[in-house]
Image: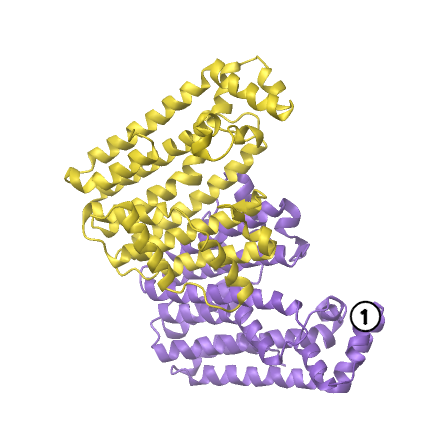
Chain colours: A yellow, B purple
Amino acid sequence: MQDFKQIVTEFEQRLQAIGLFPQAPGNLYEPCRYLLALGAKRVRPALCIMGNEVFGAVQEDAWHTAMAIELFHNFTLIHDDIMDKAPLRRGNPTIHAKYGLTAGILSGDVMCIQAYVQLAKVKNHLPELLQLFNTTAIEVCEGQQLDMDFEQRDDVSIDEYIHMIALKTSVLLACSLKMGAIIGGASEANANKLYEFGKNVGIAFQLQDDYLDAFGDTAKLGKQNGGDIRANKKTFLLLKAKELAGDNNQLDELMVAEEETKVQGVLSLYKDTGADELCRAAVEVYSDKAFKNLEEIDVPAERKEPLRKLASYLLQRDK
Amino acid sequence: MQDFKQIVTEFEQRLQAIGLFPQAPGNLYEPCRYLLALGAKRVRPALCIMGNEVFGAVQEDAWHTAMAIELFHNFTLIHDDIMDKAPLRRGNPTIHAKYGLTAGILSGDVMCIQAYVQLAKVKNHLPELLQLFNTTAIEVCEGQQLDMDFEQRDDVSIDEYIHMIALKTSVLLACSLKMGAIIGGASEANANKLYEFGKNVGIAFQLQDDYLDAFGDTAKLGKQNGGDIRANKKTFLLLKAKELAGDNNQLDELMVAEEETKVQGVLSLYKDTGADELCRAAVEVYSDKAFKNLEEIDVPAERKEPLRKLASYLLQRDK
C-alpha cells in the first residue's frame, strides 16, 4: 500500500499529464492553470486513493475521481475567495485579485464543470459516484452560505457552528474517502463507516485549527496567534466563550478595543472561561469518534494503517 | 406528438412539483426560486422533449434531462448578468442586483450543481449524456469568455463572431435536441444531424436578433431600434459594416457621436454599406442549413413536423 506522499507524487504527475486546460481562450484557462500550479497538499485526492486501497487494488477510476474532487475543491476556493474578499491564497494573489472578478467567476465555473468532465471518465459505479458527488457539492455550497450567514448573526450556537464546518469542509473529505471505497468494492456498511471517519476527522481538524490559531506554537504556524480574533471570525472558541460568559459583557467590550488589547484580552478570556480546554476536549471527542469509525471497518488492520497514520498526523496524535 | 406549448405546460408543472430548492439556507435558495419563477420561454427543455419524440415515445429520462438543461441555462444567466453588470433580467432585477454579489455567485453555483443532480437521475445512456452535457457546458463558458474578450478587441472577424455566438448560445440548443434524440433511441447519424439542426437554428436566430434589434418593427419588439448600437455591442451588422467601410472612418466617428446621431447614422451606414442585406442573407444561409439538416434525418416527415414548425416560427418563415 502506498503512503500519502507517494500518492501525491503520482497525482501531480497525472495532473501535469492530462492537460486539463487548453491554451485558448487564454483569459479563461490561464487563471485555472495558475491556481492549480500554486501547489497544495492534495489531501482530498489522496484520501480518495487511500479509500480505494483499503478495499482493493487502486483502480484507474479512482484517479479520475481524485482529479474531479481536487478540481471541485479548487473551484470552491476561487469563488469563496471572491465572497470572502481574500487577497491571498497559498501565499499568492487570489484569482479575482490577479485577474479580476469576471475571471474569478468564469474560471471557477469552468473548473467546476471540468470536475464533472473527469468524473464522467469512470467506467464503473458512475450513477452512485455521481450522486454522492452531487449531494456533497450541494452541501459544500450550503456550508459556505451558512458561514456567510453566521457573519451577520450574533446568536450562532456551537451545534450550528459544527454543522456549518461539517458541510463546508468535512463532507468533501468524507466523500473523497467514500468514493474511493465504492471504487475499491467496499460493502455499503464499510463505505459508510469510512465516510463517517472522514467527516469526524474533518470536524476534529477544523476545531484543532481554531485552537491552534489562538494558542498554537507561533514558530510552527509561521504567523502570530489570534488571526481569527483579529478577523472577528466566529470560531468554536469565541462562541463557547460567549456562551460561558453569560451576561458578562466583557467579550463585547473587548471586541471593539484596540487590536493588541483585543487579541490579548480575548485569549485571556478563552482561558478564564475554560473555552480553551473545552475546544481541546471537542477535538478529542471527534478524533475518538473518527478512530472508532476506522476500527469498525471490517477489513484487516494493516489495510487501514495508512489512513490511521494520516489521521494521527493531521490530528497531532503522533507525538 | 405534442406541440411546444403542451410540452412547456407539462415542464412547468414538473418544475413546481419536484421541489428543487429547500427552504434553508434561505439566502442560498430564495434567489434560485426567484429566478425560476420569473417565467421564461423554456425553449431548451422543450427542444429536449421534442428531440426525444422525433425518435420514440417520451421517456422519463428526457424530463430529467430537460430539467438539467434549463437549470444549467439559468445558472449561466445568473453569472453572465454579474459579468455583464446587467440590472434587469426578464424585466425584473437580476439576482446580484436584488440580493448582492455573493448571492449571485453562490446561487449560480448551486443551480449548476442542481443541474447535475437532475441529470444523475437518468436511467439509461448516463455516460453518453453526461459527456455531451459536459462538453457543451465547457463550450458555453468558452463562448462567454470570447464574448467578453471581443468587447476589448477592435479586430473581431465575422467568422470569430459566429464561432462565439455558436458557443455561447447555439450549442446548448443543439445539445438539448441531441440529448433528447439519444434518449429516444436515435442512431448516431440521426442524433448528429439533429445536433447540427439545432446549432444552425441557433446561429440563424442570433443573427436575426442582431438584424431585428436594428431594423425590426418597434411595436412588435416593444423597444426602440438600435439597442445594440447604444450599448456598443459588436454584432454581425457592426462588424460587417466595419469590414465593408474599409479605410472610411465614418463608423469610428459615429460611434463617439451624441446618442441619437449615432443610432441614426449607424443604421444608415448599415444600409449604405449593404451590411443589412448581408445580415439577412446570413440568416437565410444558416436557416437553409438547418432545414436541410432536418430533412436529412432518416425518419418519416410527420415525426419532424413539430420541430419544423417551431424553427419556422422562431426564424419567421411562417409568414
Q: Is residue A141 visible?
A: yes
Comparing B313 with B92, the one in front is B92
Q: Is residue A74 left or right of residue A261?
A: left
Q: Position of residue B113 (x, y in %)?
A: 45, 52
**Numbered-mark total:** 1
- The residue depicted at 38 percent of the width and 51 percent of the height is A69
- The residue depicted at 43 percent of the width and 30 percent of the height is A162
Can you tell which quarter of the image residue A264 is in?
top right
The image shows residue A240, relative to residue B63, as above or below, that is above
According to the picture, the residue beneath numbered tag 1 turns out to be B256
Q: Chain of mark 1?
A: B
Q: Position of residue A204 (x, y in %)?
A: 37, 31
Comparing A18 with B53, the one in front is A18
Q: Is residue B127 left or right of residue B150?
A: left
Name the amino acid type tagged 1. Answer: Val
The image shows residue B304, relative to residue B117, as above or below, that is below
Secondary structure beneath dot 1 equals loop
Q: Mark 1 Cα within 10 Å, few/some/many (few <14, many 20+)?
A: few
Q: Is residue B71 visible?
A: no
The image shows residue B309, relative to residue B12, as above or below, that is below
Q: Position of residue A158 (x, y in %)?
A: 46, 25
